[in-house]
Image (cartoon, rainbow, N blue to C red):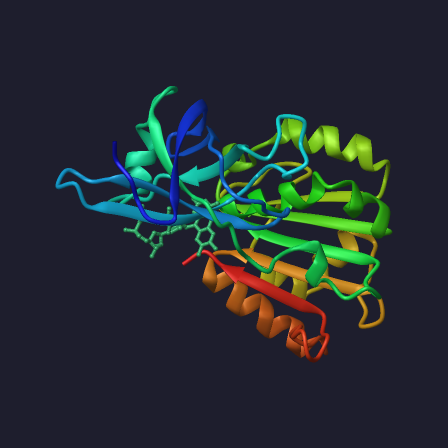
């Protein structure tokens, strides 16, 4: 039997294709505990028997109805990538290796307790960990407003619409969803990039909420160029990076 240190063998239990190169897989594996917003590693062997392992964020909350051993990941098939093209080709029932100790600091516990307005800014597949966070009942209880921003290139990449609809209903006005498409124009959907739309106040004007240092916290996740430029805009606006020893207003996770 194959073994890989730090990983447990799991099974692919579902596969959903969203676009030509974006898909979600559901995996069942007996891994250790995790909290919403974290990630683990997935691993498969290449043609030479070498292990390829990469980080992937949970889309589900660990407290979802199927139990924490049942995990969902939203993945993009990166052209000429090492692991993701192999993940794109898995079939239901295939073996997959899953890191048994999930990690990550983009969690509810890291958000300063004074924050009542939570801005979740994502690009592409990085909406995943925010959906995980939104799946927690604590999120609904703790915040007055949550603004979920998802920036993609084409409308087709605005994934998980049914789940988002369900969350909007469940959050009963507390959750605001702001899709942004950069390469197409669609009525009712913002066009552009997150840093620019933050800088010119378009995001704030659309949701009619002005972030401030007293009650706002931002999580940035995904494309490092978005994270870098958004961080610069937030600093220009007077917000500070959050550190455990010195609470601030934003924190981030780069996907590469
Ligand atoms: C904390 C963390 C969480 C992550 N969570 C996810 C996730 O939930 N879903 C996911 O698809 N990826 C996620 N990633 C990225 C993932 O770990 C791999 O880097 C990605 O699947 C590419 O691996 P690869 O072996 O196919 O490509 P590699 O040969 O390793 O090529 C890496 C290149 O792929 C591109 N790339 C990597 N990730 C992405 C992405 N998400 N979208 C667009 N381009 C990308 C970049 O150009 C990068 O330089 C995460 C990364 C980190 C650090």
Q: Nearer the viewer, residue 252 or 208?
A: 252
From this view, report whether residue 122 is shown above or below residue 74.
below
- Name the spot of residue 242 as percent of width and height, x first: 67, 72
| Residue 81 visible somewhere in the drawing | no
Residue 123, compared with residue 215, is above or below; it is: above
Quarter where residue 77 is shown: top left
Picture layout, residue 67 above or below residue 209: above
In the rendered image, residue 185, in percent from the top left (x then y), is placed at 56, 41
Q: Kindly tell me whether residue 107 is visible in this rendering.
A: yes
Depth check: give the residue in front, 217 or 25: 25
Q: Quadrant of the C terminus?
A: bottom left
Q: Quadrant of residue 94?
A: top left
Q: Residue at x 54, y 42 (%)?
A: 58
**Percent position (x, y) of residue 175?**
78, 43
What's the residue at 85%, 71% (across, down)?
214
Left or right: 147 in relation to 60: right
**Residue 247: image x %, image y %?**
73, 75
Residue closest to the far front:
1
Q: Residue furthest left?
A: 48
Name the residue at 62% across, 72% down: 233
Is residue 193 rendered to the left or right of residue 206? left
Q: How many marks?
A: 0
- Name the foreground residue: 232 vs 99: 99
Question: Quadrant of the image for the N terminus?
Answer: top left
């Amino acid at each position: 039997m194959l073994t890989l240190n730090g990983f447990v063998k799991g099974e692919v239990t579902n596969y959903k294709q969203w676009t030509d190169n974006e898909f979600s897989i559901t995996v069942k594996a007996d891994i250790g505990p995790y909290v919403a917003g974290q990630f683990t590693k997935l691993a498969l062997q290449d043609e030479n028997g070498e292990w390829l392992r990469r980080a992937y964020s949970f889309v589900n909350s660990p407290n979802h109805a199927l139990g924490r051993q049942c995990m969902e990941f939203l993945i993009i098939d990166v052209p000429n990538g090492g692991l993701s093209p192999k993940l794109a080709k898995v079939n239901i029932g295939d073996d997959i290796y899953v890191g048994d100790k999930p990690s990550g600091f983009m969690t509810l516990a890291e958000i300063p307790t004074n924050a009542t307005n939570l801005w979740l800014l994502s690009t592409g597949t990085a909406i995943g960990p925010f959906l995980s966070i939104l799946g927690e009942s604590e999120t609904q209880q703790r915040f007055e407003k949550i603004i979920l921003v998802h920036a993609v290139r084409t409308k087709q990449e605005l994934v998980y619409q049914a789940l988002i609809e369900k969350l909007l209903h469940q959050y009963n006005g507390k959750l605001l969803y702001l899709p942004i498409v950069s390469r197409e124009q669609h009525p009712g959907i913002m066009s552009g990039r997150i840093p620019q739309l933050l800088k010119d106040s378009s995001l704030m004007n659309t949701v009619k909420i002005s972030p401030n240092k007293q009650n706002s916290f931002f999580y940035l996740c995904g494309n490092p160029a978005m994270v870098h430029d958004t961080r610069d805009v937030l600093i220009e606006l007077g917000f500070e990076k959050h550190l455990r020893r010195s609470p601030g207003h934003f924190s981030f996770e780069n996907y590469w």
